[in-house]
Image (spheres, rainbow, N blue to C red):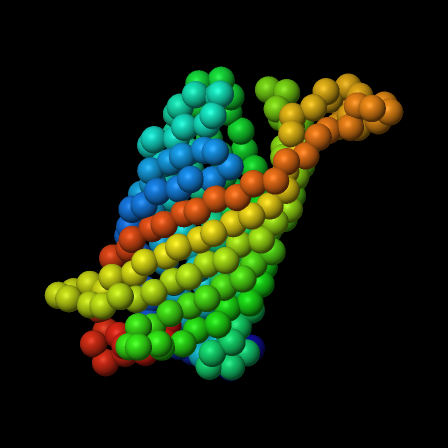
Amino acid sequence: MKKLIAVFVLLTSMFISNANAQTRVLVGAGGSIAWDNTSAVASFGLEVPFLKHYELDLKDTFSPFETHVALGGGYANLTSAGGHIWLTNSLGLNGKVERTNYSVTQVSKVADYAFGGVTYRTVSLGVPSRFSFDYIGQFNNGVAPSGVETSHLQGFAFIIENRLGCAGPFCFRLENQESFGRVLTQGDQYCDGSIGPLVPGCARGSAFGGGFTGTFYLEFPRRKATENDSF
């Protein structure tokens, strides 16, 4: 038993020291135009590579300036947790769950999404880059106590991340995300199948849309020996 405990402590200490040695901290700001909504955001993230083939990614993004067409303005927050499994030095699988909530003049809403797809990382013209193509699916769908129905988003996202260069204690990262999907419009809960039987002619309508998000990050600590390598 003591030997098992000793092995566990050793492996745990190796994981922690390895993760701490490679952890990347991201602090940034940006903006978004998506589904006719606009926002300005501040973002904080952690990327923790470990055991050579794995990476844990955590991020929180706050928008103090959130505007929704016909619904007014307010604030929003987005929290995500996920990671990568690197199958080769260049190709990996990615996945994450994301919770977003916003409160504007006329409504408050919470939504949960799952992302999953593939990521390709490389160095092109001296610029370390990542390219991810993901499927997006909304879950925990239903009707909120306020009476607002979730939109059942189904779509795709294309994400490009570039490390543009480094100076002083920081490296500079740019992340662009383009998304496209189908959502259900707000319906009559008592006849569209949300909280009662589906009535002919009462099904919720649908709409297609998309958006673009751009965020500029400071990445630290700077590691001069590997700053030009793929990340």
Please name the residue shown 60% across and 56% down the image: 135
Side of 214 where 53 appears, left or right = right
The foreground one among 100 and 33 is 33
Above or below, 185 relative to 45 = above
x, y (%) of residue 206?
68, 34
Residue 133 point in image, percent of width and height: 54, 62
**Residue occupying the point 32% across, 58% down:** 174
- Residue 187: image x %, image y %? 69, 24
The C terminus lies in quadrant = bottom left
Image vertical order of residue 62 relative to residue 189, above or below: below
- Is 23 positioned to the left or the right of 132 in the image? left
For image coordinates 83% across by 24% down, the residue present is 201
The residue furthest left is 168
Q: Give the total number of marks visible in the rendering.
A: 0
| Position of the N terminus by quadrant | bottom right
- The reply to whether residue 67 is in sight is yes
